[in-house]
């Protein structure tokens, strides 16, 4: 600290304070209209106008400023608005009451007062710097930086004037990076000693303004002069290190031409024009502008903030602060990009939903129309069994088509909700391909197509995989190829084992190729998106809602595989899948006897059918009784449990259990049965028959003690096979 300049500044403040005290004026209210008019009316006011303007400046600056007596109880003389806000006080009276109107009352009770005063005493003739904690109005604490100067008086009491700033974050950073901060402080101290006496006085003010601004100017718009308080690498050379006031228009022109990004120069020039500044500050105390500066070939974002520190009715004196805002702008740009992407995704989702609803409405109504139509025709021809049978077959085919649509929607919902999982089980890859091939062979024969299956290059056909999902994947892919290939065309399925990997793993390749209608290059990008179809059912004449390939892609992803597609309109499509499977160490031939073993119809076994829907109960009862079973109904799980408890063991051979029922659902009923005291009753086979078909539902059925879980609508042959398997396991 320059002793001469410091004493000069302090002397002016002491004289100003004495003048106010002699005339019973309070420095803390001097900016208020009544106090200001009283001061300006004093004969000595002209002599202390500089001090008045300095107080006006201190009241508006963003950093804290404080004056207090150096002796006695260290009574506070003046605290600017930023200081009061730091303590969460709305006015000077509240601040005085909270602190006891003393510097001692400001400091946290646990702070080391003697350490603070020792630092101050050691620097009485220089600028002192201390850090300590304060207690805010809400009881919270924060660290502050205190830049102060001691001013002795020969005619009055000695004073301290200090600049305060919040140092909480700085303290946290320093605690984490102590060594780095120490190096910075050493460099700071070296720089501090190089600054000349005049500029040091200015830095006292600037340190109180803000630690976030790299450049700060004080500008007198009436005189057209700009004074530097803090300089950066960009603004420093403009002043040639003289730190003297220069022409404001000339400095800004130099800065804009040499540093501002060419695309932003016009905007910055307008924002720093004196007339424009005064106009913007008519309605507010400050404003800011963001712009870019050049750093070599890179652009950096800066924010310029302009604050009116002159008279309220006219912006004649301003403070301009410049700070880096790269991270803030980048975050803002990233947020805008995320919002734009979210909007785009939302619009695409809305479009996909509209397309889905349109296709779904059409493709569901088509089989429903057939069901209603053929039902009407069957009623009219009830006396002709052959015609009725044909209509019933058409109704069944339409029902399966409708069920296929519903199943695909549910399967997609499963995969997107994360409910679907894969399991590892022994299966035969070639058998799966053969089953799909034989299932679709009649359709290919009907279309007079060349339909080829080749798995000759598969060395290890026995693998560990999720058999059901693998079959589903192949079925959707091959069915698409057969469906979208015209009569007389060609579809081939080729499976190969490309290479063996360690730990009995191998890379398998599945290629499904056709010479069908093909896919445009524009649509290939969207081919795996839900509900997407290049042509809807009306245009293509082919039923579907665009979910098959989406499900295929999801299954491939779950198996950590890859899928690629190549296609050309009018020439066909090729889908190539690569998946790693663990193969079985020993190939096991399929059990021919088991494969050919047919289930014998029921022989009077008694089944307890638990079903709350009368129509479903009627259908299930009719079908089961036709197959030779004896059926007894129960309307809900509670009744089923009661019937089992009251019947002698062995009365019922099996329970067919619905899930969603009033009073007690199927899961609750199964758990209650498994807890029965009689071991025979507790082990009775239970098969879930429900429209709840998600994997989570099946897992819940297994966890509740059920032996199997079958979906509705009832597939009688699958039910019979399941009953056979469950009873076989119980007997083994």
Image (cartoon, rainbow, N blue to C red):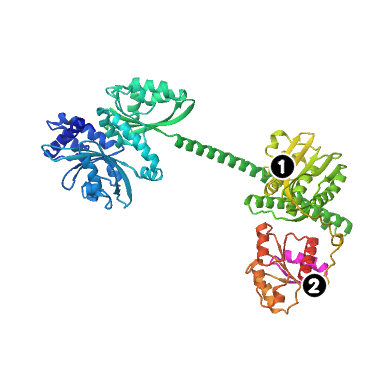
Residue at 15% over, 47% down = 72
Q: Label 1: few (<14), some or many (≥20) within 10 Å?
A: some
Q: In this rendering, is residue 430 above or below 277?
A: below
Seen in the image, is 485 located left or right of residue 66? right
User: In the drawing, what numbered circle is on residue 563?
Assistant: 1
Q: Is residue 567 on the magenta stretch? A: no
Mark carried by residue 605: 2
Q: What stretch is highlighted in magenta?
A: 606-632
- Quadrant for residue 250, please give it: top left
Q: Can residue 447 be seen here?
A: yes
Q: Which of marks 2 and 1 is in front?
A: 1
Q: In this view, does 171 lie above or below 425?
A: above
Label 2 Cα crowd, 10 Å radius (few <14 / some 14-19 / many 20+): some
Q: Is residue 315 visible?
A: no
The quarter of the picture where the C terminus appears is: bottom right
Q: Does the magenta stretch include residue 623?
A: yes
Specify whether 181 is left or right of 198: right
Query: Residue at the location (75% across, 77% down)?
Result: 651
In the image, taking residue 294 as reference, residue 350 lies left or right, namely right
Which image quadrant is residue 545 in? top right
Q: Is mark 2 on a helix, strand or loop?
A: loop
Q: Where is residue 6 in the image (x, y as percent from the top left)?
A: 21, 33
- Front residue of 687/535: it is 687
Q: Is mark 1 on a helix, strand or loop?
A: strand
Q: Which of 330 and 106 is in front in this view?
A: 106
């Amino acid at each position: 600290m320059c002793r001469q300049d410091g004493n000069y500044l302090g002397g002016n403040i002491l004289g100003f304070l004495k003048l106010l005290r002699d005339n019973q004026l309070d420095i803390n209210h001097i900016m208020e209209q009544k106090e200001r008019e009283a001061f300006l009316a004093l004969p000595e006011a002209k002599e202390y106008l500089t001090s008045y303007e300095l107080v006006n400046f201190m009241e508006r600056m963003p950093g804290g400023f404080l004056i207090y007596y150096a002796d006695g109880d260290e009574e506070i003389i003046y605290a600017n608005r930023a200081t009061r806000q730091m303590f969460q006080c709305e006015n000077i009276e509240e601040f005085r009451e909270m602190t006891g109107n003393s510097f001692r009352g400001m400091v946290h009770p646990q702070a080391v007062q003697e350490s603070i005063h020792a630092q101050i005493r050691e620097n009485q003739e220089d600028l002192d710097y201390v850090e300590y904690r304060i207690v805010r109005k809400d009881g919270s604490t924060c660290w502050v930086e205190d830049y102060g100067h001691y001013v002795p008086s020969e005619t009055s009491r000695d004073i301290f004037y200090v600049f305060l700033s919040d140092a909480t974050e700085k303290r946290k950073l320093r605690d984490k990076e102590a060594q780095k901060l120490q190096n910075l402080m050493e460099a700071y101290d070296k720089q501090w000693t190089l600054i000349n006496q005049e500029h040091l006085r200015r830095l006292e003010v600037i340190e109180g303004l803000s630690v976030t601004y790299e450049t700060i100017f004080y500008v007198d718009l009436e005189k057209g002069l700009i004074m530097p308080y803090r300089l950066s690498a960009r603004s420093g050379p403009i002043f040639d290190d003289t730190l003297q006031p220069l022409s404001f228009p000339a400095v800004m022109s130099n800065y804009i031409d040499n540093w501002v990004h060419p695309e932003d120069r016009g905007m910055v020039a307008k924002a720093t024009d004196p007339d424009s500044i005064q106009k913007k500050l008519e309605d507010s105390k400050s404003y800011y502008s963001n712009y870019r500066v050049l750093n070599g070939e890179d652009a950096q974002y800066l924010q310029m903030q302009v604050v009116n520190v002159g008279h309220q009715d006219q912006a004649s004196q301003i403070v301009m602060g410049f700070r880096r805002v790269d991270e803030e702008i980048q975050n803002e740009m990233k947020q805008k990009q995320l919002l734009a992407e979210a909007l785009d995704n939302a619009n695409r989702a809305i479009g996909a939903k509209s397309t889905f609803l349109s296709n779904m409405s059409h493709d569901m109504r088509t089989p429903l129309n057939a069901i209603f139509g053929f039902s009407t025709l069957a009623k009219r021809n009830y006396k002709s069994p052959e015609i009725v049978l044909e209509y019933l077959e058409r109704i069944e085919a339409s029902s399966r088509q409708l069920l296929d649509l519903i199943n695909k929607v549910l399967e997609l919902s499963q995969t997107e909700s994360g409910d679907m999982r894969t399991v590892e089980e022994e299966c035969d890859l070639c058998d799966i391909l053969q089953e799909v091939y034989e299932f679709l062979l009649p359709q290919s024969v009907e279309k007079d197509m060349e339909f080829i299956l080749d798995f000759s290059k598969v060395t290890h056909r026995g693998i560990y995989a999720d058999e059901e999902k693998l079959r589903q994947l192949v079925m959707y892919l091959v069915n698409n190829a057969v469906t979208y290939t015209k009569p007389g065309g060609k579809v081939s399925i080729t499976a190969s084992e490309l290479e063996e990997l360690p730990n009995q793993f191998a890379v398998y390749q599945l290629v499904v190729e056709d010479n069908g209608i093909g896919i445009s290059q524009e649509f290939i990008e969207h081919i795996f998106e839900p509900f997407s179809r290049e042509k809807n059912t009306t245009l293509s004449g082919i039923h579907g809602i665009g979910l098959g390939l989406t499900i295929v892609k999801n299954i491939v992803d779950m198996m950590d595989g890859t899928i690629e597609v190549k296609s050309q309109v009018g020439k066909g499509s090729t889908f190539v899948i690569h998946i790693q499977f663990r193969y079985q160490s020993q190939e096991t031939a399929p059990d021919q006897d088991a494969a050919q073993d047919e289930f014998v119809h029921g022989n009077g076994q008694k089944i307890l059918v638990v079903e709350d829907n009368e129509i479903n109960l009627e259908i299930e009862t009719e079908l089961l009784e036709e197959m030779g079973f004896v059926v007894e109904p129960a309307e809900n799980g509670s009744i089923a449990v009661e019937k089992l408890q009251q019947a002698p063991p062995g009365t019922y051979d099996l329970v067919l259990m619905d899930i969603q029922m009033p009073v007690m659902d199927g899961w609750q009923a199964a758990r209650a049965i498994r807890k029965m005291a009689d071991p025979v009753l507790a082990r009775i086979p239970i098969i879930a028959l429900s429209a709840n078909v998600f994997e989570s539902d099946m897992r819940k059925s297994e966890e509740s003690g059920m032996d199997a879980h079958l979906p509705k609508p009832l597939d009688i042959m699958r039910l019979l096979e399941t009953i056979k398997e469950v009873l076989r396991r119980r007997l083994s």
